[in-house]
Amino acid sequence: MEELILAVEARSAEEITKHGKGPGTRWVFSDNRNNPGGNIYVAARGVDNVDRPETHVEAHRHAFESLFLFKGDGPDLTGLVAEVQLDDRWERIESPRAVRIPAGMSHSYRFVSGSGEMWNIVLTPGADYNKTAR
């Protein structure tokens, strides 16, 4: 049962394909290090008082579906603004929002303003983000 309770770590996104360090703190909940027998990658990034867009993720694709979740720090989950790139279009996202990214779709994101969290959930064999990112 011990292998079912996963340790969570703060780590730089520089360890994954097409990502730079980025603003705030990235927390890894499930990946190939702590959940190698799983099939889901989950990380969250918390930011405070973003006041300008900063791109830290190059556009990329995954072989499987993924999901972005945006949650602001307001009591109704508002308070965070981001932009999400889906293929060649940029969409403005105001929290709370979820963005479904189909397998094979080019995507990226950047924070624009506010405070809150962005959760990244990727279906991938062995919970290995880099295995399916191109």
Image (cartoon, grey):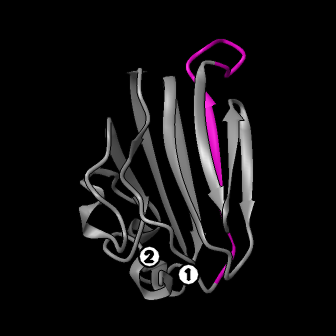
Q: Which residue is mark 2?
A: 129
Apparent side of residue 93 relative to residue 112 in the rendered image (left or right): right
Mark positioned earlier in the residue sequence (2 or 1): 1
**Mark 1 Cα-neighbour bin, 10 Å: few <14, some 14–19, many ≥20:** many
Q: Amino acid at mark 1?
A: Thr
Give the residue at x 28% y 58%. 20
Q: On screen, 64 above or below 87?
A: below
Give the residue at x 72% y 52%. 99
* Tags 2 and 1 touching, CB below 8 Å: yes
Magenta residues?
A: 64-78
SS of the residue at dot 2?
helix
Q: Position of residue 52 (x, y in %)?
A: 41, 27
Q: Amino acid at mark 2?
A: Tyr
Q: Which mark is residue 124?
A: 1
Image-quadrant location for residue 2: bottom left
Q: Position of residue 13 (x, y in %)?
A: 30, 58
